[in-house]
Image (cartoon, rainbow, N blue to C red):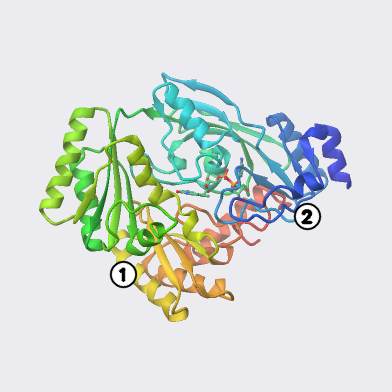
């Protein structure tokens, strides 16, 4: 046992510091089943223990890697053998729900689903939602500024955080547990921790904003003949559903076809349409909301804006439609896949998607670029499957990221930069922005102990 691990064990106790086989038997992440590599895993129970652990790591100049639910898509939580992992897994308490102020105060290791369920018990909604809800944590959601399926209505995680507490690189506790929507007393320091992927501090507690729990939910999967019709449908739904549209998920034909291949999901409608849209509206007036939703579908069918529609008749059927969009495991199994998450102006999306598909096919004639995304917020996901065992990740990155700069797109819509996209950060950020990011990193973590090598090269 080396000196820093001994000091951590002495301070926090053996049960709080895992080493050896207890480290290796854990998977690296949701995406990578390889054994975890790290000097130790530290599992503090509260902020005071974490502050003590960081003070020790600071004293020994020991780099750390922070882990929430390990579902992040940019390998930011994948540790190296020289790092100590800080796991928030035991800081999983929902401390308070204020039904009058509509806020919740939670420890950072609470899973997204646990918070959603706790809010629902009080007839309140925690509006962030994404496929990894059962595993990802609120701290991870803050650190990555997570997006997901409700962004068009409620915004990203940044819009839902009112206050937070974090432990800084030297063990100092920064408490900024604001509960109000309005607070312009000086700098809004919580923003330093949101979307900075654990490079400036470790989030320990969070105050989030809740919303009234909707009492109606209307959903449908519809088919469109081209992308212009998809965007027109989006505008119509936003206008005609009285602000209740909460999700608008678009699947290109190749996503839908792959998701409903034998062994995958049962196709809710034929696989011949160029685009499939899963739209959902949630409101507070069940009768009127259903009428408005049905009217939208009737009118858009009559006018040819949509070609087909499937309306679920039960909660089970509604979930089955969502499974097509959210559960893509079968599509990935046994296939080399490069995962992308870009954003760009919606008006450029159809041409961009065509260009990327052409670039991929030019490079790998048997390959495919499967496309889907949240779209209403300009967010497109891609699975590039080169169908070639020695396919080069860099060539795939060139094909996907290359066309983005000219149209003002971003190499990361919601997954962050982590390790995987670090080389491409300069493609979406200018020199002045990069220099200020480095200044902030130097100011808060001069010894580069927090998630070193993630997000920005120093
Ligand atoms: C099936 C699936 C669907 C997904 N869908 C979406 C989606 O729709 N939208 C979306 O935005 N993301 C999505 N993701 C990605 C992922 O769920 C999010 O990035 C999530 O916010 C990560 O949370 P986590 O707790 O798993 O963080 P981790 O993966 O553990 O960590 C992610 C990053 O945050 C840092 N970090 C974690 N906890 C803390 C903390 N307490 N303090 C400081 N830094 C910390 C880590 O060091 C790392 O850099 C999806 C992932 C999967 C597997």
For label 1, the crowd category at 10 Å Cα-Cα, with few meaning under 14, some 14 to 19 and many 20 or more, is few
Image location of residue 373, percent across then percent down: 38, 55
Can I make out residue 364 in this image?
yes
Q: Is mark 1 within 8 Å of ligand 1?
A: no
Q: Seen in the image, is 387 located left or right of residue 247?
A: right
The residue lying at 57 percent from left, 74 percent from top is 389
Can I make out residue 186 in this image?
no
Image location of residue 178, percent across then percent down: 51, 29
Q: Is residue 125 above or below residue 259?
A: above
Distance of label 2 from label 1 (alpha carbons): 44 Å
Q: Seen in the image, is 193 located left or right of residue 278?
A: right
What is the residue that sits farthest to the top in this orientation? 100
What is the residue that sits farthest to the front in this orientation? 262
Question: What residue is shown with label 1?
Answer: 351
Q: Quadrant of the C terminus?
A: bottom right
The residue lying at 38 percent from left, 76 percent from top is 358
The residue lying at 72 percent from left, 29 percent from top is 48
For marks 2 and 1 on the same chain, the one whose residue lies earlier in the sequence: 2
For label 2, the crowd category at 10 Å Cα-Cα, with few meaning under 14, some 14 to 19 and many 20 or more, is some
Q: Is residue 180 above or below residue 244?
A: above
Disc number placed over residue 82 in the picture, else none = 2
Q: Nearer the viewer, residue 22 or 241?
A: 22
Which quadrant of the structure image shows residue 350? bottom left
**Is disc 2 in contact with disc 1, using a CB cutoff of under 8 Å?**
no
Q: Nearer the viewer, residue 430 or 312?
A: 312
The residue lying at 42 percent from left, 81 percent from top is 362
SS for dot 2? loop
Image location of residue 142, percent across then percent down: 53, 42
């Amino acid at each position: 046992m080396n000196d820093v691990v001994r000091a951590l064990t002495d301070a926090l106790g053996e049960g709080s510091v895992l080493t050896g086989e207890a480290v290796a038997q854990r998977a690296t992440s949701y995406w990578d089943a390889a054994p975890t590599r790290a000097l130790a895993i530290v599992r503090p129970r509260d902020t005071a223990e974490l502050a003590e652990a960081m003070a020790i790591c600071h004293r020994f100049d020991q780099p750390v890697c922070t882990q929430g639910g390990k579902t992040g898509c940019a390998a930011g939580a994948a540790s190296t053998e020289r790092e100590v992992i800080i796991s928030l897994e035991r800081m999983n308490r929902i401390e308070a729900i204020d039904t009058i102020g509509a806020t919740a105060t939670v420890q950072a290791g609470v899973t997204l689903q646990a918070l959603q369920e706790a809010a629902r018990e009080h007839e309140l909604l925690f509006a962030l939602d994404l496929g990894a809800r059962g595993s990802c944590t609120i701290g991870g959601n803050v650190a990555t500024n997570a997006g997901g399926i409700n962004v068009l209505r409620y915004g990203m995680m940044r819009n839902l955080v009112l206050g937070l507490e974090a432990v800084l690189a030297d063990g100092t506790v920064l408490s900024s547990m604001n509960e109000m929507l309005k607070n312009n007393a000086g700098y809004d320091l919580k923003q330093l921790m949101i979307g900075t992927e654990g490079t400036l501090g470790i989030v320990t507690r969070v105050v989030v904003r809740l919303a009234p729990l909707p009492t109606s939910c209307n959903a449908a999967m519809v088919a469109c003949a081209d992308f212009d019709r998809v965007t027109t449908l989006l505008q119509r739904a936003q206008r005609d559903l009285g602000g209740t549209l909460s999700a608008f998920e678009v699947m290109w034909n190749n996503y839908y076809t792959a998701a409903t291949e034998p062994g995958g999901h049962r196709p809710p409608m034929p696989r011949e349409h160029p685009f499939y849209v899963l739209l959902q509206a949630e409101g507070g007036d069940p009768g009127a909301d259903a009428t408005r939703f049905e009217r939208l579908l009737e009118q858009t069918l009559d006018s040819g804006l949509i070609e087909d529609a499937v309306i679920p008749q039960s909660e089970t059927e509604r979930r089955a439609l969502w499974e097509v969009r959210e559960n893509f495991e079968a599509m990935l199994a046994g296939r080399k896949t490069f995962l992308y998450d870009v954003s760009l102006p919606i008006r450029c999306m159809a041409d961009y998607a065509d260009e990327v598909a052409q670039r991929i096919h030019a490079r790998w004639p048997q390959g495919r670029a499967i496309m889907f995304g949240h779209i209403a917020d300009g967010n497109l996901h891609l699975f590039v499957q080169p169908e070639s065992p020695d396919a080069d990740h860099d060539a795939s990155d060139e094909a996907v990221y290359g066309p983005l700069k000219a149209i003002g797109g971003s190499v990361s819509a919601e997954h962050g930069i982590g390790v995987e996209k670090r080389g491409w950060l300069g493609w979406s950020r200018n020199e002045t922005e990069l220099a200020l990011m480095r200044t902030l990193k130097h100011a808060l973590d001069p010894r580069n102990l927090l998630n070193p090598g993630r997000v920005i090269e120093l």
